[in-house]
Image (tube, rainbow, N blue to C red):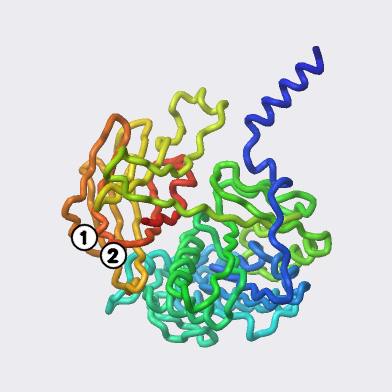
Amino acid sequence: MRKKHFLLASAVILLFMPFGAFAADIPALPEFTKEDRVLILAPHPDDETLGSGGVIQRARDAGARVQVVCYTNGDHNELAFIVYEKRFTFRTGEFLYMGEVRRSETIKAMSSLGLPAQDMIFLGYPDFGTMAILTLYWNSAKSYRSLMTRISKVAYSDTLSPGAPYIGESILKDLKTTINNFQPTKIFVSHPADTNRDHQSLYLFTRIALWELEGKIIQPEIYPYLIHVIGWPKPRGHHLDLLLKPPAQLGGISWKQLILTDKEAKVKQGLVDFYKSEIECNPPYLYSYARKNEIFGDFPAINLKDNSAGSLAWQSVVVYQEPPEDRSLKGKGKQNLTGLFYAIRGKDLMIKLDLRRKLDKNLGITINLLGYKKNSDFAAMPKISVTIGLLGMRIRNKAGIAAANGAKLKFEGRSLIVNLPLATLGEPEKILTRVKTRAPNFPLEASAWRILTIK
């Protein structure tokens, strides 16, 4: 009888154990060779170490060439500045100084691994401003203006394009130049489900750059790494004996991992020591990423085909459901979104959101849609945001109102369905999209950026 009880208890534990608990079973990252050219794209100075410090060591030990590119200098972190400098400021030059401090920390950390100066590139775009650039600032006489530095162009001299205006064309040009010059076989970049907007935008700009370089370079393998997710990773602090597990609230990803040797793990922990300006603000946090492994993975593209002749074939975006023990809350704190689906019918993109309750004052939904079409200027393609609230639906293209004749919004039971003409998106072949809301407990998988391909 005890044996039966034990087996039953074990089965229950396995059934409800979150996906992240199986980190030891994640497939291995492919081994590096001396023919590899490994490009590390870091949103801010320190992300190259946190996300891929082990990769950099392993690749260099295999004889591969490694190049590290920092997207921003991380000059927007006022709290880190106050703690590090032990003073308060709103002066423009002080934030640029902090950007130089963070840049120097990455240089010291990477130099300790033997990475030469020519393989450390800084782009200098605005910390906390790159998502606004991606969605708003294209073909514009007006550049984005950074909130903290109050400047609108690359202000650092030791960057790829000093003085480049803060517009989408500048970032896309720099990434295309970097990738084309280096010809990487593998790219490690921030994740589309990361909750930090610079991390999201770097992934998106990288995807766009690679699409525009198709046929001009051999397409590299892409390995996104995750840094910012609420409540992850745990426990905080020094835990070289623990595996880094994928967040339990994030499914639908085929993860791969690099298991670090004891030496590699200790070296990575030592690399974190270089980022003093960040450590002083939150001492345990950065060390939480120095574990026995590093994990990488991406969502598959969602392929959409027109099925005008038959019944509508919705393509589902997996939405995480609460574990059974949370169902006793009787609706309190539960996710309102229970399903997210996409489809093509005729000349329309259709988006369906299954909700537990209809819209209320706490649930404002925004759907971002960035269309891409080969041989079309991405800067000229629409950058659409659809905002849905109690007063209906509003559609904008970048900073202006979009002409979207034929756009529709309707409820079918508790399902909200949006019809958006593909012409509004520039008749795209691919769409970068995400759904976000003001409501709490919104599923991470829905708020992550996804790639739709239209056949």
For image coordinates 41% across by 79% down, the residue present is: 170
Question: Which quadrant of the figure contains the C terminus?
Answer: bottom left
Q: Which residue is mark 1?
A: 402
Crowd rating for badge 1 (residues with CA inside 10 Å; few <14, some 14–19, many 20+): some
Choose between 389 and 3: the one closer to the eye: 3
How many marks are shown on the rendered structure? 2
Tell me which residue sits at (38%, 73%) in the image: 168
Q: CA distance from mark 1 to mark 2?
A: 9 Å
Mark 1 near mark 2, Cβ–Cβ under 8 Å?
yes
- The tag on residue 382 is 2
Q: Residues within 10 Å of mark 2 (few under 14, many from 20)?
A: many
Q: Nearer the viewer, residue 276 or 177?
A: 177
Give residue 277's position: percent from left, percent from top: 63, 69
Q: Is residue 60 above or below residue 336?
A: below
Looking at the image, residue 424 lies above or below residue 171: above
Residue 413 drawn at (x, y percent) = 29, 29
The image quadrant that residue 116 belongs to is bottom right
Q: Which residue corresponds to the image point at 81% horizontal and 60% vertical from the top-left?
A: 261
